[in-house]
Image (cartoon, rainbow, N blue to C red):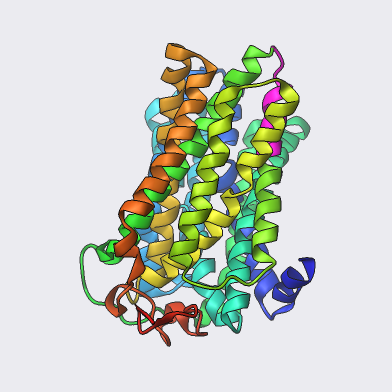
Amino acid sequence: MAAGYLDILRARHAARLLTGTLVGRLPSGTAHIAIVLFIRAEGGSYTLAGALAAVYGLATAVGQPLLGRAVDLYGQPRVQLPAAVVSALGMALLALAGPGSLPVACAAVIVAGLFTPPLEGGLRALWPSVLDGQERVHRAYAMDAVAQEVMFTVGPLLVTLLVSVWSPAAALLVINAVGVLGALSVVLSEPSRAWRSEPREAHWLGALRSPGLLALLGSFFFVGLALGSITVAGVAYADDHGRESVYGWLMAALGLGALIGGAVYGARQWAGAPERRLRFIVAFLALGYLPLMLTPGLVPMTALAALAGVFLAPAIACSFIVVDRHAPAGTVTEAFSWLVTTFGVGAAVGTAAAGPAVELGGTRWSFAVTGASGVAALVVLLATKKVLAVPGRTAVAARGSENDRNGTVEPGFSSGHQA
């Protein structure tokens, strides 16, 4: 298992691109925590802190596909680095101004979120130009999904460490400065400087003119909704048991399950169409979410949380392949950015929906939101089975395109049609 990932990391530029992207994404991966801690330390209310974190999230959701389209049009260095700098300046403005002036604080988080560089989509666009063969590219997608789980675990710990050693304002400044350095490392690399998008058909919908991509985004909106609702449901479960540490254990178990699932998924070669495989993975993901409604004692609940996380990273990794196959020519970065946006919006909706569910029916109802969302994600994939089954050349990466320049189209497909 480890040998396969080491093989990827030994490829020229691979380790640098992965590390630079993860470091560059630290600001966006930790912003919600950093903003809340800073606003609270400055005397702001939890309501204000949560509202500013939500505004940042919405601004990021809007900015990612727009900047992704800009990357496809103008290249990575001309978009990624300037965006990272402007985003960092937005957070610096928040750190300097504080919550005293609400318009300034809102403007600061809007700028920071809107200009968050689409490093995530950019990395996935680069993998086919860095690695040879479909197995290595697909394994890189899995490694990418696993690395995200590590970042979302380590990032908050880094923020809390900076807060305890220095201050919440310093945490905002340092994390975003480090993020700029990560983006700089990526855009100065040879693959990023050399990458060019395939010529694209002028269309105002961009990547969204692909029916297959729309189907995938519809499904992953509900996957994000499930994950967002778990965060609130986990807090409610911890409150029921009178211990704040319970929440940490549940989230750690969820992350551990995702790490294990992603590592196992990426360690083997998978035959057949990824769209079909994704339906099975999401089915198991939904089945893993449903038992959480039982809300048993701490030990079995922790085990159920770990089980619920097992199929998350494989689902994300497999979705990367599906996006790659359905993105219209010249829109690969934008398409990946739409996946990030849809997932993030779903998570925000899930967080909002789980709160009233707790108030109305208790902890079990909040976990019911999680389970229902997982089932809804599967239903969307099943309902759009025909749309996803036949990615046509004008709406998908075909052999030789920028999305598939190393022949990553899987066996059973030729020129976008099943054999």
Give, as a single range, the part of the protein colored magenta: 242-254
Task: Reply above or below: 140 against 120.
Answer: below
Give percent across and percent down for residue 262: 65, 56
- What's the magenta bit mostly, secondary-structure-wise? helix
- State the quadrant of the C terminus: bottom left
- Let me know if residue 221 appears in the view: no
Task: Reply above or below: 68 against 154.
Answer: below
Q: Is residue 249 magenta?
A: yes
Q: Considering depth in this image, is 387 or 146 the residue closer to the camera?
A: 387
Give percent across and percent down for residue 243: 72, 16
Residue depicted at x 37% and y 30%: 103
Q: Considering depth in this image, is 219 or 75 the residue closer to the camera?
A: 219
Horizontally, residue 271 falls left or right of residue 201, namely right
Give percent across and percent down for residue 72: 38, 72
Horizontally, residue 167 falls left or right of residue 320, namely right
- Let me know if residue 130 appears in the view: yes
Residue depicted at x 43% and y 40%: 375
Task: Reply above or below: 372 against 319.
Answer: above
| Residue projecting furthest to the front | 419
Give percent across and percent down for residue 28: 54, 47
Query: In the figure, residue 299 lies in which quadrant?
Result: top right
| Residue projecting furthest to the bottom | 400
- State the quadrant of the N terminus: bottom right
Image mark count? 0
Residue depicted at x 63% and y 13%: 240
Q: Is residue 83 magenta?
A: no
Query: In the figure, residue 160 lies in which quadrant?
Result: top right
Q: Considering depth in this image, is 16 or 81 the residue closer to the camera?
A: 16
Horizontally, residue 222 falls left or right of residue 227, namely left
